[in-house]
Amino acid sequence: MEKQVAWIDNIRTLTYSDHHIQSLINTDNKLPYLFWKAENKVLPIKQIKKINDTTLELEVAEEIPLGEDLFLHCGDTEIPVYPRGIVRTDWFDKRYAAIDQSLGAICSPNATIFSVWAPTATSVKVILNENSYLLNKLEKGVWKLELKGNWHGQSYEYEVTVNGSNKRVNDPYAKALLANSQKAVVVDFTRTEQFSINQKRPFIQQLQDAIIYELHVRDATIDQESGVQNRGKFLGLAETGTTTKNGFSTGLSYLKELGCTHVQLLPINDFARVDEFHPNDAYNWGYDPLFFQTPEGSYSVLPDRPIARINELKAMIQAFHNEGIAVILDVVFNHVFVMEESPFEQLVPGYYFRYHPDGTLSNGTGVGNDIASERRMVRKFILDTIDFMLSEYHVDGFRFDLMGAMDIETMQQIEKRCQKEEAPIMLLGEGWDLPTALDSSLKATSYNASQLSEIRFFNDYFRDSMKGNLFEQQDTGYINGAGRFLERMPHLLSGAALDPNNHASINVNQTINYVECHDNHTLWDRLCLTHPDLHDHDRKKMHQLATGITLLSQGVPFLHAGQEWFRSKQGDENSYLSGDSINMLDWKKREQEKENIAFVKALIALRKKYTVFRMTSQKEIQQRFHVLETPYPVFGFTLLGDTDDFSIYINPTKEEFDLHLPSSGKWKRAVSNSVSEKEDIIGEFTGIHAYEIIVFQKTRNRATNEVAVVLPGN
């Protein structure tokens, strides 16, 4: 039989549901009352309202205390009273917002302060070395205790009494964990590896100069051909000088050679589904988050040593920084793996997650729960995590998974925190509008990008225009549809700057241009779906067009690891659990496609050398970017630099076309996917081959009348 409970849904309101609700009213017509046990106090019921045949709403004469043992009395019947909807009211959020409190286990050599937020709990203890210590209840629902002694490396958990039951709960602010998230571990961070005092984050003049490379820690080095000793681990990506058996660079050294400025790592915080003692028995991308401030144990060579994984993650980040590569963390603040098992839900039931007005759980993320980022203490946790990763791990950016499910104010506060760093911090995310229980005007979606000026958004319009609608597998775009969507190209390649009315929801400083990522089919697999009968040679040419356009467009380019060698996942559209055979980077393929890698490297080098490929204002782009007259459906445009001009042509067909270069002078072929060597082209007339993308370059002769474009402020 289900236990009878009365719920606190508002500060003066109880809700009680039972098939025999008349039992709440005594035969002598006396109203029931609320009893506050600790104070031995009676709180009268002013009014009872019947909601339906099984539910009553009871109005209490004064505010109902929270975090106390309460009972509803009716004659001889005693019914426990627990908080429910009250935790999602504005009153609760304001009353218990402990914004300035430091939470977690804060360890020094001589003492550790344990602090946890649990305003609806009636008791909180910390269990340390099998000893139990009662925490003190402070204002705003914070429980705190200082324990003298050296507790560094010791495991702990909380024993919490909430809604009438005792539970052992891990600290959501845990900085370290025993293997497989068994218990939290106290850490004195002065006793972990420290970053060099003299070393700063990799220098980047401005974030528009970034070229992002998305990588999964395990995928990067798990292949035996990688030549890495610590395959699939943090330390594997810290190794330099690694090669295949044939001497081709791999791992970190390969990334350095490729030339990308930022590596974006799929989640590296503690996640579910992989046994950290036996990591090779399972696989996961990392979007099943458990603990947000603890490194994932399956990426550690010593998963049973909690401090080791901290040091190994730091070593990996330090190694990237030593090579001049910035590190972006993919963070998943929109959901947890299993809500009911989350320490958030166990500590403050019903608070950390979104609900619809009818009391049902919101599931806009599609994974069972939506984190309520708009609530003050949820926002605090997110901001505290961002601050911790910046301060302790010196990361250089954050990519927000399903960012459109988060709220604008939280993202604005993240912007504000990141601006305190000396080096610019890259912030980017998925701005999709998801059906979560939050008003659209409050969501951090691309439609609201004007309110998030320092945040960049994945440009799905760019992606779908290049290769076809993501959700229609046979659909085509410009590169695989013989020039379909040609009319969109000026808008897309100019970062929306050529839109005369600037209708774009995201501007040139907010667009992340991409054609593939870890999600959905790789570009190669997509081309196999849209053109199953096409020869591999032609598919590779189409692929090169898409990658080339991504790197030559205004905005920040984003490459998926292995994209530069036609990465395939054997047609697997959602490989988040699919194992190494599907997901690992194939370093043999890297050897086989060295010519295409050279093509991509040349484009990256060109982009990094000339600022005209990474302009920062609509006005500048409008003055320097000009669309050229070309035969349909070839697209051409010219970029007028200060010392060099560029003319770029893209042919998405099997036909060849004659072209006229836009001005006289000596043009040279700077980059092309049709020839590997550079050739000088003299004169105004040349042609473009099938599926070719070609960049012509001309250096101005300052002795002639040719002059650079002069812009205000230059």
Image: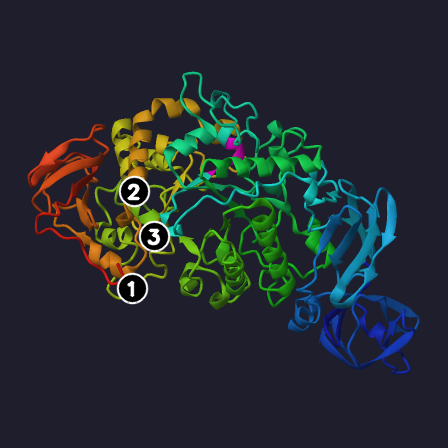
| Labels 2 & 1 near each other (Cβ < 8 A) | no
Give percent across and percent down for residue 500. 24, 64
- Whether residue 154 is visible to the viewer of this picture, yes or no, is yes
Task: Identify the main secondary structure in magenta.
Answer: helix
User: Which label is found at residue 461?
Assistant: 3
Amino acid carrying label 1: it is Asn
Regarding mark 2 in the picture, which secondary structure is present there? helix
Quick check: 346 left or right of 577? right
Is disc 3 surrounded by few (<14), some (14 to 19) or many (20+) residues within 10 Å?
some
Q: Which of 149 and 439 is in front in this view?
A: 149
User: Which label is found at residue 67?
Assistant: none
Q: Give the range drawn in magenta.
A: 215-219
* Badge 3 or badge 2: first in the primary sequence: 3
Residue found 88% across the figure and 82% down from its top: 30
| Labels 3 & 1 near each other (Cβ < 8 A) | no
Q: What is the CA distance from the residue labelled 3 to the residue labelled 2?
A: 27 Å
Q: Which of marks 3 and 2 is in front?
A: 2
Q: What is the CA distance from the residue labelled 2 to the residue labelled 1?
A: 28 Å
Regarding mark 1 in the picture, which secondary structure is present there? loop
Q: Which of marks 2 and 1 is in front?
A: 2
The relative height of residue 64 versus residue 147 in the rendered view (above or below) is: below
Amino acid carrying label 2: it is Lys
Quick check: 521 left or right of 535? right
Q: Name the residue under label 1.
A: 502
* Badge 3 or badge 1: first in the primary sequence: 3
Query: Is 568 in the magenta?
Result: no
- Residue 437 quadrant: bottom right
Residue found 41% across the figure and 39% down from its top: 560
Amino acid carrying label 3: it is Tyr
Residue found 85% across the figure and 72% down from its top: 23
Q: What is the CA distance from the residue labelled 3 to the residue labelled 1?
A: 15 Å
* Badge 2 or badge 1: first in the primary sequence: 1
